[in-house]
């Protein structure tokens, strides 16, 4: 296994950070690398906002539902689906951009932002930095949009805390590989038993960590997904110009 | 710059592949690494379909609008946003999953599939494999869904061609870094002139490659984004159970 695969297979989310700035050249290295990733039709419909201002990180930690690591770590990256720049291209050419009106535009912008964050995670961890992904910025998208001064046709999809780890955290087990990798066609046959086996794995994992959670993956995930826990995403996208075919 | 960042900064899409299988252990290494990437609430709402069957790759190359590299390369990966597995978790717990009814579910599934593909690209290229991302599978999602036997609450977001490169391809210039990385807030001020400068860079890039395209980034991208070029995404998502708040 090479260095890059080792980095990936050691991925863990870090919830505790040293009080230590990240040198500017490291931040630049990570983001330069990320920008090399591909985007749909080379549209480059992604931007990253680098937040280092303490008051702003504090505000974001509250917007995201009280996540203290956002305030604690030195850098917070916001991955933005961005059809504002492509729309400038349209203006230069006298074209009218319509892609943001369709769910296809949302899919492209969000997927490319995901590719960028995947690369950022691997890049940061390869440099010894710790990270934790933050979906909670979608709890109150309008406040994020205002705080980051995001223009029309952009949407803040997710964030990434980045800093020097103050602890090592645990490697969290995954569902059996066979539920993730399917050959030729999607295989439903043994999924229920594989998920039940993973529920036991996770119960043991939490017990070993000393957590008193009598929880499982099925309990935890289905307990969240029985709600639309971020209901403001739809109206906020709409007011940013993402109509999602309405 | 370490090995991982070097891999990223050398990323290029490869359109020509050797007629040579990828050893099974390399495919496994890539996908094992990818599965370690984080997912929202550890929901693991991503699956990857590994397609190696020649007839199926041929069919996909046609579904995707005639992209011969899909048929030519030995492996095609399909990244699937997957709330079928989480729904099994809900069934185990007697909960009713609703997240797939909201755009929030779409954002989560698509973003996490993007993280996975970003990691797959870096993993594959770190092993000397070449890749090309394929959004064209969304041209005819229903045919892909049928071909891959995808169940309810899953959607094929994008594909990735993977094989041993038969040429080295070119490193495609990106927009100026300052249009990608914004500090503290989104900076609109100089975007138009930076995009115009990039248009000139791309014109020179195409000329150097011997392409007779008198095109620019603005022309190319806005020429595509003045249409909803994949209009079947919205109805296909709906028939897979993704209601997007309708």
Image (cartoon, coloured by chain):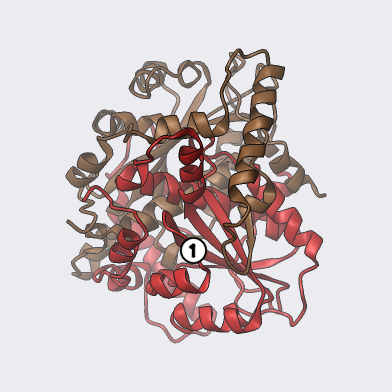
Chain colours: A brown, B red
Q: Is residue B94 above or below residue B242?
A: above
Residue depicted at x 65% and y 45% = A194
Quarter location, residue B124: bottom right
Where residue A34 appears, x then y in whole percent?
Answer: 54, 48
Q: Is residue B199 visible?
A: yes
How many numbered marks have been drawn onto this rendered protein structure?
A: 1
Task: Write down the chain letter for disc 1.
Answer: B
In the image shown, does A86 or A28 lie closer to the viewer? A86
| Left or right of residue B95, residue B128 in this image | right
Q: Is residue B146 above or below residue A141?
A: below
Under tag 1, what secondary structure?
A: loop
Where residue B205 appears, x then y in whole percent?
Answer: 49, 73
In the image shown, does B114 or A212 lie closer to the viewer? A212
Write down the residue under mark 1. Answer: B150
Quarter location, residue A163: top right
In the image shown, does A72 or B163 lie closer to the viewer? B163
Residue depicted at x 73% and y 61% = B27
Q: Is residue A115 visible?
A: no
Residue depicted at x 51% and y 19% = A69
Where residue B141 appears, x then y in whole percent?
Answer: 40, 70
In the image shown, does A53 or A6 lie closer to the viewer? A6
| Left or right of residue A167, residue B77 in this image | left
Where residue A215 appears, x then y in whole percent?
Answer: 56, 23
Q: Quadrant of the N terminus of chain B?
A: top right
Around disc 1, counting alpha carbons within 10 Å, would you say few (fewer than 14), some (14 to 19), or many (20 or more)? many
């Amino acid at each position: 296994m090479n260095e890059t695969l080792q980095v990936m297979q050691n991925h863990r989310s870090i919830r505790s950070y040293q009080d230590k700035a990240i040198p500017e050249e490291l931040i630049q290295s990570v983001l330069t690398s990320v920008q090399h990733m591909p985007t749909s039709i080379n549209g480059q419909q992604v931007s990253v906002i680098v937040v280092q201002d303490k008051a702003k990180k504090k505000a974001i930690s509250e917007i995201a539902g009280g996540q203290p690591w956002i305030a604690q770590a030195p850098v917070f990256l916001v991955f933005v689906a961005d059809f504002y720049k492509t729309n400038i291209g349209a203006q230069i050419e006298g074209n009218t951009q319509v892609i943001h009106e369709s769910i296809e535009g949302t899919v492209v912008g969000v997927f490319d932002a995901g590719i960028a964050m995947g690369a950022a995670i691997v890049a940061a961890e390869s440099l010894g930095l710790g990270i934790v992904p933050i979906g909670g910025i979608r709890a109150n998208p309008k406040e994020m949009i205002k705080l980051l001064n995001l223009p029309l046709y952009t949407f803040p999809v997710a964030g990434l805390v980045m800093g020097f780890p103050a602890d090592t955290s645990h490697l969290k087990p995954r569902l059996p590989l066979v539920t993730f990798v399917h050959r030729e066609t999607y295989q439903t046959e043994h999924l229920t038993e594989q998920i039940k086996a993973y529920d036991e794995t996770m119960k043991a994992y939490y017990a070993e960590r000393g957590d008193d959670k009598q929880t499982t993956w099925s309990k935890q995930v289905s307990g969240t997904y029985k709600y639309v826990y971020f209901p403001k995403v739809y109206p906020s996208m709409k007011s940013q110009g993402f109509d999602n075919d309405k």
